[in-house]
């Protein structure tokens, strides 16, 4: 595993495990929880120690339970969760309560990385929410704080008032939508980018291109795409319900893409 250093010195494994359908009936995002921790157990056994969840996914307790059951020390894990700002913002007390619920469900007294899930059209409220995240950060309950789905103009709202800069910006980035300009903007501002849905967006054509590159290296299309992202310093959080595919997404540290490979992938 490669660890990257965030702007506050905290280290994060460059490959994490997405979880948005984990623990759910039929692996369906909108379904109810089944009540078991099968995919989290599988991921831990496969060697994942970095997990990406969110209040919105309704499965923080599945992750918390899986980690606790593993018997592996909490400090060996890196947990990201997110404040659910999708359905609205309800003020400081609400943020405080939702954070306490996350800690409770995750069965932990700290979160490695806490993100605002999505910006909304109210700079004063966003500033207020960020200042609360800063308080939890300063109290050591969040080891790092950041944002998700923030464009450059949303980040500037935070920059205008923050005392702690976002450490991570989690955005959609995959074939067909690499989001290169925003990744550069994040980098220029010393903010690390995480790519969500890293394996989506392939067309028949782009699938053939990455398969061809993969064949050359003895790797799968998914490994090629994840390698492309980590070679440019982007953190990835692939999600799979399948043991072999989970393992493959971690097995990307023993090959290197050529300049030609990278140029072809960049154009997809
Ligand atoms: N911040 C946000 O707003 C936001 C939004 C979306 C997602 N996310 C996060 O990003 C995570 C990943 O995104 P995602 O779940 O949408 O999709 P993804 O990781 O891009 O994966 C897409 C599909 O690819 C398959 N797959 C996974 N690993 C593979 C491999 N090694 N080889 C071949 N196929 C593979 C999986 O199906 P199988 O299960 O059949 O293998 C999966 O359903 C989420 O789980 C969530 O944690 C965040």
Image (cartoon, helix red, strand yellow):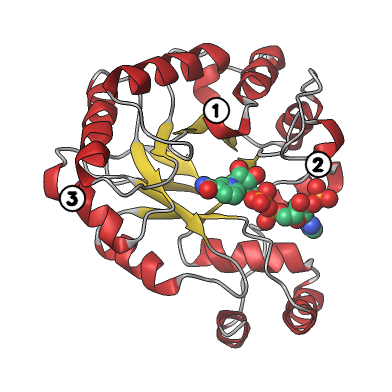
Q: Residues within 10 Å of mark 1 (few under 14, many from 20)?
A: some
| Residue at the spot 25% in from the left edge and 26% down from the top edge | 132
> Which image quadrant is residue 9 in?
top left
Q: Position of residue 38 (x, y in %)?
A: 81, 26
Q: Determine the secondary structure under disc 2.
A: loop
Where 258 falls versus 118 (above or below)? below
Residue at 79 percent of width and 40 percent of height: 28
- Residue placed most toward the observer, 153 or 210: 153
Whether residue 73 is visible here, answered yes or no, is yes
Question: Is the CB atom of the residue marked by disc 1 within 8 angstroms of ligand 1's nearest atom?
Answer: no
Measured Cα–Cα span from mark 1 to mark 3: 29 Å
State which quarter of the image contains the C terminus: bottom right
Mark 3–mark 2 Cα distance, whole angstroms, equals: 38 Å
* Residue 191 appears left or right of 161: right
Kindly identify which residue carries mark 1: 77
Q: Is residue 120 placed above or below 184 in the rendered structure?
A: above
Location of residue 250 in the rendering, given as x and y in whole percent from the top left corner? 69, 49
**Residue that mark 3 sits on:** 159
Q: Is residue 28 left or right of residue 161?
A: right
Answer left or right for 86 relative to 258: left
The residue at which mark 2 appears reads as 241
Residue contact at pointers 1 and 3, CB within 8 angstroms: no
Name which of mark 3 and mark 2 comes first in the sequence: 3
């Amino acid at each position: 595993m490669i660890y990257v250093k965030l702007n506050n010195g905290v280290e994060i494994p460059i490959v994490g495990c997405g979880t948005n359908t984990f623990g759910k009936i039929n692996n369906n995002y909108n379904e109810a929880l089944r009540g078991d921790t099968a995919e989290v157990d599988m991921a831990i056994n496969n060697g994942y120690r970095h997990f990406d969840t969110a209040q919105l996914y309704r499965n923080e307790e599945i992750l918390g339970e899986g980690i606790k059951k593993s018997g592996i020390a909490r400090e060996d894990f890196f947990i990201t969760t997110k404040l659910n700002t999708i359905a609205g913002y309800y003020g400081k007390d609400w943020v405080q309560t939702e954070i306490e619920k996350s800690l409770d469900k995750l069965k932990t007294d700290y979160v490695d990385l806490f993100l605002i899930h999505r910006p909304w059209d109210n700079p004063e409220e966003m500033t207020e929410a960020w200042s609360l995240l800063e308080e939890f950060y300063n109290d050591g309950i969040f080891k790092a704080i950041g944002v998700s789905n923030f464009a450059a103009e949303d980040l500037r709202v935070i920059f205008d008032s923050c005392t702690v800069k976002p450490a991570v910006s989690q955005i959609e980035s995959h074939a067909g939508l690499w989001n290169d300009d925003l990744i550069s903007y994040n980098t220029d501002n010393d903010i690390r980018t995480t790519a969500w849905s890293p394996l989506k967006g392939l067309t028949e054509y782009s699938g053939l291109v990455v398969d061809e590159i993969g064949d050359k290296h003895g790797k799968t299309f998914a490994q090629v795409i994840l390698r492309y992202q980590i070679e440019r310093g982007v953190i990835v959080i692939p999600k799979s319900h399948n043991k072999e595919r989970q393992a493959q997404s971690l097995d990307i540290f023993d090959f290197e893409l050529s300049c030609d490979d990278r140029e072809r992938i960049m154009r997809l």
